[in-house]
Image: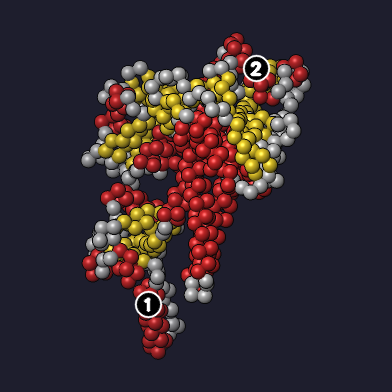
Amino acid sequence: MVAEQAQPARGTQSQLGGQSERERVNATARAVVESAADAIVAFSTDRTVMLWNPAAERMFGWAADEVIGLEPPIIPEEHVAEHNAVFERVRGGGQVSFATRRIRKDGSMLDVRIDTSALTDSAGEAIGWVNICHQTGEDDVVRHYMAERARVVRRLGDVVADMNAQRDLESVLDRIAASLRELTGADAGGFVLIEEDRLRLVSTAGLPDRLRGRVASLSSSLVGELLRSGKTVMMATGESGGFDDLIWSALPGLHTIALSLSHVGGRPYGALYALYSRRTLSHVELELLELLAGHAGVALTNAMAFEEVVRQRAHERAVIDGSADGIAVLDEAGNVKQWNPAAHRIAGMEASQVMGGPPPFPLPAPGERRTHKLPSGRWIDVLCTELGEGGEKVVDFRDVTAAKELEEAKDLFLATTSHELRTPITVVQGFASTLASRWEQLSDADRRAAVRTIAERAGSLGRLVEQLLLGARAGADALPVNNGPFDLAALLRAAVVSFGPLSDKHQVVPDVPADLPLASGDSMATDIIVGQLLENAFKYSPAGGTVTVRARAVGALIQVDIEDQGIGIAPGDHERIFERFVQGEAGDRRRFGGVGIGLYIVRRLAIAQHGTVVARSRPEGGTIMRLTLDQADGLPPGEIYLG
C-alpha cells in the first residue's frame, strides 16, 4: 500500500513532473481500492478504522463515515482476541489468512475469509494493518477449519514424536518447554515439578536461565488450586500483571497464566505453565496446552523408565521384559545379547533366532530414529542409544503399523469421499445449468427427466452424508440404540419387498418362518443393518443372481443370513472388511465406489444390540453375511449407548 516516489535528477520541471506522476499513481491506487470487488478495511496501530471501501459498505452495511476513526463494529465479542492476535502475528511482516465470522449492521453473521498484512510507510515502519475480506460459503469455512486443524494435529504429532525420541529426562523437560511456546504462542513458559509441599522450576523457555531451580509453595500456588479443583487445565488473569506464586518468573506486563497437569504413574508429577504478556489466548491454546501436558507425562514416563534401566543394571532384565516396546541390547560388536518378549511379538522372531547375531533390521545412528518396514509388513520406529563408553547399545523399537495404516486409510478415505461427492455434484450441476440456460427449448418430458436425475443424485448425496455421520458416531462410540422386543420376521419381509424392485438383475428370495420368535434389539438399527447388507449383496454381485434372506432360531439366538452369488471375499479379508475405510479388494473402490465404512457401521450397530455380524464365503461362490441377535426374553426395553 506504499507507493514509491520518483526522484527527479534536478530542476523545477523534473520536480513538477515527479509531483504529477505521484499524484497520478495515488489517484490510480485510490481508484483500485474504490473499485475493488472485495471489502478492503485498513486499521491504524490503535486498531481504529483508517479506510473502508465501497465493497466493505456493501458487505457489512455500515457507510464509511460511520466507522472511520472508530473501532470496527463488525467483530463479534468472541472473536476480539483472535482479531488482536492476528494483528500481532503480522506486525513483523508477512501475511495471515484465516476463516472467521463478522457482524453486519442488521445483526446477521457473515462467514468470511480474511487476508491480513501489515501496512507500512516509506521507511518500512508499521503504521497499521490491511484486511481483505472475502465472503465464503459454509463448505469453504469447513475446509479451512479442517485444514487448519489438520495442520495443528500434524505439528502436534511431530512435536510429540520428537519429545518421545528424547530419552534423557532433562532433554525431555527442555523439549516440553520449547514445544509449549511453539504450539500455543505463549510469550514464555516452564515446567515445574511437584515435590511434596513445594514446586521447583526445572525447565524454562523465554525466561532467564537463572530462574531454574527456584521454588514456591504448593498450597498457595495455582498448581495447588488446580489440584484442589480436580481439573487438569486452568487459566488465571491478573489486573496488575503479577501473580503471587510466580513472582520469580513473571514477565513484564504478564496478564494471563494457563497451566495444565502432567501425570506419571497415575499421580500428578508436575505442571506446564504458559505465560502471556503481549497477546491473549483462546480455547484452542488451552486445548493444545492440555494435550501437550498429557503427552509430556507420557514422554516423562518413558524418559524416567529409561534412566532407571541405565542406573540399575541389576534390575534391567525385569524392566526390559516388562516393556511394551521391543528392546534389544547389543554388545560392542553389534550382536544381540538380550531380546525381550515385546521384541519377539513385534519382530516375529524368537530370542534363539537372533541371539549372537545382528538385529533383523537396520539401525539408525545413536540418538536418532528410523522407521523400517519388516518382511512381515509391520512398520517399526527404531531408536538406538549407546551405553557409556563400552560400546554396548540399547535398541528400542515399537510397532507403528496401526498409525501408518490409519494415516494411509485416512488419505484414501479423503480421496475416495471427494470422488464420491464430486460425481453426483457434477451431474446435479450439469442438469441444473441445462435447465437454467435451455428451459424454453426443452420439452416437458426432458425437464421432468432432468429434475428426476437431480433428485436421484441429491438422494445419493444425502445417503452418503448420512453414512458419513453414522461412521463418525460409530468411531466416537456414540451410536444410540433402544433395545427391546421387536418383530424381526416382519422387518425382514418388508426389506425383501422394498429391495426386490431395485434391481432387474437380482431376485430377492425370503426364507423366513412364520413362527420366528421376537428378537431383542433395536428395530431401526436392525433395519439399517439389513439394508446395508442387501445393498452390498447387490453391489458385489454385478452379474445378478439370487439374493436369499434367511432367518432361523438357534437356541436362544436368531440367525439372519443374507446370501449372494457375487464375487465373494478374498481369503484373509473376512474380518478386515469390517474395519473403517476398507473394501474387499484393492481395486474395489474404483470398481464399485463407496467410502468403505458401511460394514464398519453394521458391526458397531450389531454390537450395540449385543449381537454379532460375521462374513463367510459360499463354497459355490458368493458371500454369506450373518447377523445374530438374542431372542426377546421379556426384559423391558432400555436405551443404551455403544461404548
**Image location of residue 307, percent across then percent down:** 54, 20
Residue picked out by circle 2: 341
Q: How is the image coloured?
A: secondary structure
* Mark 2 neighbour density, 10 Å: few (under 14) some (14–19) many (20 or more): many
* Quadrant where the N terminus is found in the figure: bottom left
Name the residue rendered at 55%, 24% in the picture: 558
Q: Quadrant of residue 119?
A: bottom left
Count of numbered badges drawn on the protein: 2
Name the residue rendered at 41%, 41% in the picture: 184
Q: Residue extending furthest front?
A: 514
Q: Earlier in the sequence, mark 1 or mark 2?
A: 1
Spatial separation of the CA atoms under disc 1 and disc 2: 75 Å
Determine whether the residue tagged by mark 2 lies in a helix, strand or loop: helix
**Label 1 is placed on what type of residue?**
Ala
**Label 2 is placed on what type of residue?**
Pro
Q: Say the numbered circle drawn on residue 31.
A: 1
Front-lying residue, 208 or 532: 532
**Image location of residue 28, percent across then percent down:** 40, 78
Q: Is residue 370 visible?
A: no
